[in-house]
Image: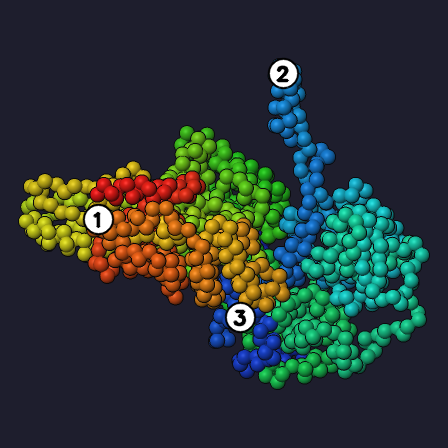
Amino acid sequence: MSAMDRLTALLTAAADTPPTPRELAELLWLAGLSGDPEESPRPPEPRVPDAAAAGAGRDTGGAVDGPADDAAGGTSDSGAGRKDGSASAKSAPDDPAERVPLRLPAPGPSDDPGDRPGGGAGNRPVLAPAPAMLPHPLALQRALRPLKRTVPSARARLLDERATADRIARLGAHPDVWLPVLRPARDRWLRLNLVHDTGPTMPVWRPLVRELHTVLAQSGVFRTVTAHPATPDGEARQVPDLADGRTVTLIVSDCMGPQWRPGPAGERWYRTLRHWATRMPLAVVQPLPEHLWSTTAVPAEPGLLSCATRSAPLSALTFTPYDPESAPRPDAALPLPVLEPGAPWLANWAALVASPGGARVPGAVAWLPPSPVPPGTGGAEAADPAALPARDLVLRFRATASREAFRLAGHLALAVPSVPVMRLVQRAVNRDPRPQHLAEVILSGMLTTVPGPPGSYDFRPGVRDLLLRTLPRTTRGRTRELLDRIGGLIDERAGLTTGEFRAEAGGADGTAGAFATVSAETLRRLGGDTDAGEPPPPRAAGTTTLLFETPTDLTARPETRITLEYAVHEVLARGDLTPQQYEVHVRGNGYAVRIRPEAYLLPVLAAALRGLPGPLAELAERPRLRVTFQDGPEFPAPPQGAAPVLLTVPPALYAAFADSSAASGPHRFRPLFGDAPDAPPPAWYCSLPPEEDAADTAEARDDVRNPVRGPFLARDLRRLGLPAPGRTAIVHTHADSPLTLLDPVLPYDGRSPRPATYYEVDLAPRHAVDRVSLPSSGKGAFTAAVELTWRVDDPVAFVRAEPTAVSERLLAHLLAAGSRITRHHSVRRAAGAQRAVNSQLGGWPVPGLAVTCAVTLAPDYAPPPEVRRPAGRSARPLRDLLADAQTVLFGFDGPLTRLFTATTARAAALDLLGIVAEHRDPEDALAGRPLGDPGATGRELFVHPLDVLRAFAQDRLGPLLRDRLDRLELSAVPDAPTTHHSVVLVRTLHERGRRVGVATDVCAAAVHRYLETYRLPLLAGVHGRDDDLGRLTPDPHRLLHALRPLDAPAATGVLIGSTLAELAAARAAGLRFLGLARNPTVEQALLGAGCDAVVPSLTPVLEAVRTL
């Protein structure tokens, strides 16, 4: 049999049909072009020092019983992040087999994989993330606030409407001849040049430069933030050096490179620095700690800095050192500020730049002479670390290093001292990791560079063993928990941040040579596969996929395909993406765009919001389009409304959007809730309606029948004000937190303010009436008059449910549930069926509602029951309101007396706030955290002492504030004036057979002391404030307690009050409310809240009672 016959037989057996001659010819042609597949290169072997492997080999699977501060430090720094991450060290499985070890790759392939710990074909390469070098980026941004000024723009102009109108009015000119008046637009004051050293010692600080650039660019302080490299030959090209007073320059350098030393590069670099120094403010950001600055080419000394004007160049600075015996200033030298990358240093520098003159701020200065100064020869030169024994190196480091750096070095002896691993270990063991501690370890002399990427080090001989002895015995012998803690930091960031360094996962030797252990899910997110025999997934770690999907196949709709492709490329082009940053893949129902990790996605999101639906709206058959920014697992499908475009983004991208200027536009994102009620939203979505339907959508969103308004975006929750007690609630959420009811005192729970999405929930009761037919057990039917009253009882649950058409859903449930009940009753037993329906109805389908229902049944052959329609507000006459009232309750402060005037109420509120300030947490005071809520919802809005008491009702200071308010109210009673006609009205109501009582939030002792001189007939009693502060109005407990001994139904009661809190309590208790408004503002508020009637005084009430 020939080769062709054998090939034909194989193809026939595989496909059950013989191939045609053409198919054979094409197969042979393709085989000739393909060639032999090349053998895939073997992954590099991990490089592990012997001592590290020995230290890791002592693993016994136990926990690290290190010092208490180590344990605390390992959890405090990443505690906030571990709440939101996919995994954490605390949640690591106890079974070591469930975690995958990570090792650093070897610098080159090994001839024998078995010679290295963990080496072998089972290793999978991954790209692992590392913690941030800047621990507190928000603090850095806040430190720069003195520079956040605006000035008139030199180019941009805006129309000055007022001046233009004034010109037209004065000149009376024809519109064809007058010119508009323009005024300068407001612009940010400064532009920033961020010059970063690229010398041989700077690669380890590249992450710091990148993070510092991001923090400064996102701060919103500067007009522009541009990064410029400074090469070791002393060149720094294309750095703007405008002498306009609006440009500043920061140089990020460790001052160890050749351009800082004598030589041609140094001469060139110093000429550049002095040129900048005469034209603009200039400073060096030094990543090394302050006590190591003396070892650099630019040593600095502390002192006081002052300048004559704002944004003064270095030539205008004055420096006074703290040490009066310091070395004199070199000839023609300029003071060059040197800063650590920390908030206090940047705050002092910002205050110096923004100072109009005369201010003296602390700082450190290095003298900038015309040329580099050779290192001094007076002192003894430092010994070469390679010539010192290991013991001397460790002892010298212990004597000079900080406590945090020495603890970090000890724990690094259990791992590989590569810079990314150092950052992970530092975050795991130190409370407040700083880049200065990392620099101390790198410059200690205990490390030596090894082949590999920048930042690859190893301990000098003997140093590792000595450092291991500095650790507790349990820590040295058991490394499992340390590996899990380091792996927990990677678990948190996997799939959320881009990878920074290469690692290898797996291996047959357990955790030998590993620097961390991660979960299988983390390994999948990092780009490795949990099965050794399968290749990694095609999508790299950190890659975002932008999906444009339609519900139909576009193969048969070429016009829609072409239009959608045009829209996709418009979004990518307007999103400032270069063609090298993305790949577009065609799918049957749309497109998938793979975006590289380094791409900035916020402009792409802004382009999608502004450009969609775009050309799709012009199609005759407009498709529904779903756009998804996917950076991890698939999101749950958002609810598909009438909008043609539905845009979904992950929480991290939404947080960036909310913190940008794009959030000021008309687009509002809604949280996409998962299954767990207390979990943060897994994604956020936004509907993009076509322009012709935008008005209808806005009208539907603001429908007055819907208790929920929103979502809205607030830059600062403290500016929302205090919600009306019992009338309005505010529910808010962040990108990384679940829905939460707003605490007006501590909206951020001690954290820094940040943008938040919030909803306004109307808590006022709503009514629905209807007449329906319910079946009976026989042939007849019941005619039912239904009256539903419902209000939002749990705002968080109600907002999360996102209900629509609430009244219709409640009535539909009543009809379904009532039909099941009445089927068991004869049509002749309408009274029994009515009692059964009213007692058995429940299980309402809308979460977060408190529902009351009254059903009146009648046989179908009898006259139908009357459907009571709720009267409009204040449309009911006073006589009708009081005619069927059996019990009339009075509020105290307002209806009976005026206990506090506006001035004394404000003074009493400040008195209570003073107690709060006196008993605040000392740590909060030392840290500078504001008292309670210091913004717009703080002291300015507490206009009455009861507002303060309600705000701190659940606080530990509640009882103390209650006792103080009791004394203030008792002292105010002797001077409190009686409300006109209040005493006569109480006696007249008693004469007309009404039971009268007092229900108030004022303490009962103050009420009794006031009423004892009048001897009023209060048969319903006096019900004042008790020890349970949770029962203050708008809680209806006190009103219900007043009605309970009288066995009076709430529908026959009336409350006469003057506050929104009393109105809300009356609504919740089922009482009618008569409002007493002393001014139009109070009257408008009560009417807007649905008050039954509002009167300016008690005179019309007394007249109406006398007619009963």
Please tell me whether mark 1 sits on a helix, a strand or a loop: loop
* Mark 3 or mark 1, whichever is nearer to me: 1
Numbered-mark total: 3
Q: Residues within 10 Å of mark 1 (few under 14, many from 20)?
A: few
Among numbered discs 3 and 1, the one appearing first in the sequence: 3
Residue type at numbered disc 3: Ala
Residue 269: percent from the left, percent from the top? 85, 53
Q: Could you tell me which residue is drawn at 25 percent across and 58 percent down?
A: 1019
> For mark 1, what is the residue?
992
Identity of the amino acid at label 2?
Gly
Q: Which mark is residue 881?
A: none
Q: Quadrant of residue 396?
A: bottom right
Mark positioned earlier in the residue sequence (3 or 2) = 3
Depth check, mark 1 against mark 2: the one in front is: 1
**Residue at image coords 90%, 60%:** 329
Relative to 768, 651 lies left or right: right
Label 2 crowding class (10 Å Cα cut-off): few <14, some 14-19, many 20+? few
Residue at 27 percent of width and 56 percent of height: 1017
Where is mark 2, residue-wise? Answer: 172
C-alpha distance separating marks 3 and 1:
73 Å
Where 421 sits versus 262, above or below? below
| Element assignment for label 3 | loop
